[in-house]
Image (tube, rainbow, N blue to C red):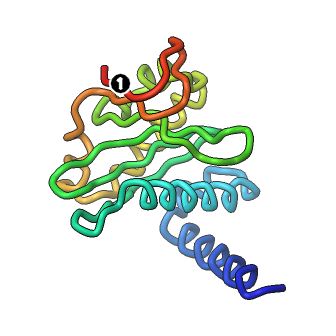
Amino acid sequence: MNLHSILRRMLHGVLLACALCANSITAAAEPPASVPARIEAEHAIRHLLMQTFDRPEERLAVEPVVVRGRHAIAGWIQGPRGGRALLRQDEHGRWQVLLCAGEALRTAPLLRESGVPAAEATALAAALAEAEKGLPTGRAALLSTFEGVVRISGKDPHGHHGHHGH
């Protein structure tokens, strides 16, 4: 076993312990087998967003991240602005940012319009509302400062590709 494998296992153990302590209510509501997968997905999503959007002159903060099925919503704050990103896990297990929005991503209709199955959309919206309750008031308000809906990647259900705003 090489050093990378050992460190990865240690990190997973630490992440699992932290998540179980910090999210005991959420973790208790999910089957035990899904908790490690959810924690790994949250870590991968944070890593993707940090790698893509973090800048030394304007640091990115990613919180909260909620995952249901193959979809996730991540709240983000960068400087004086914030928003939410909708992500989808592809068939190879990689996460892609589909779109960014503000308040609209808190509700199931935009999620369904963006191709999220109805049950996942409802579960995501509920999980996000619960996760955002734990954020400080000013921080939670920043997540809704993003205006409009901007599609980032992937194919939307209406057949449009690439970057465009709504």
For mark 1, what is the residue?
A: 164
> In percent of the image, x 58 and y 68: which residue is there?
20
Query: Is 30 on the left-hand or right-hand side of 127?
Result: right
Percent across and percent down for residue 157 are: 54, 16
> In percent of the image, x 48 and y 16: which residue is there?
160
Placement of 109 over or under 2, stated as above or below: above
Amino acid on which disc 1 is placed: His
Percent across and percent down for residue 105 are: 37, 32
Query: Is 150 on the left-hand or right-hand side of 1?
Result: left
> In percent of the image, x 57 and y 58: which residue is there?
44
Extreme residue in the front direction: 162
Query: Is 106 on the left-hand or right-hand side of 144?
Result: right
Task: For the C terminus, give its image quadrant.
Answer: top left
Percent across and percent down for residue 62 are: 38, 58
Extreme residue in the right direction: 1
Percent across and percent down for residue 67 are: 56, 46
Packing grade of label 1 (10 A; few <14, some 14-19, many >=20) is few
Q: Nearer the viewer, residue 68 or 85?
A: 85
Task: For the N terminus, give its image quadrant.
Answer: bottom right
Q: Nearer the viewer, residue 42 or 123?
A: 42
Q: Secondary structure at mark 1?
A: strand
> In percent of the image, x 43 and y 20: which residue is there?
109
Q: Nearer the viewer, residue 77 or 55?
A: 55
Query: Is 128 on the left-hand or right-hand side of 13?
Result: left
Q: Quadrant of residue 85?
A: top left
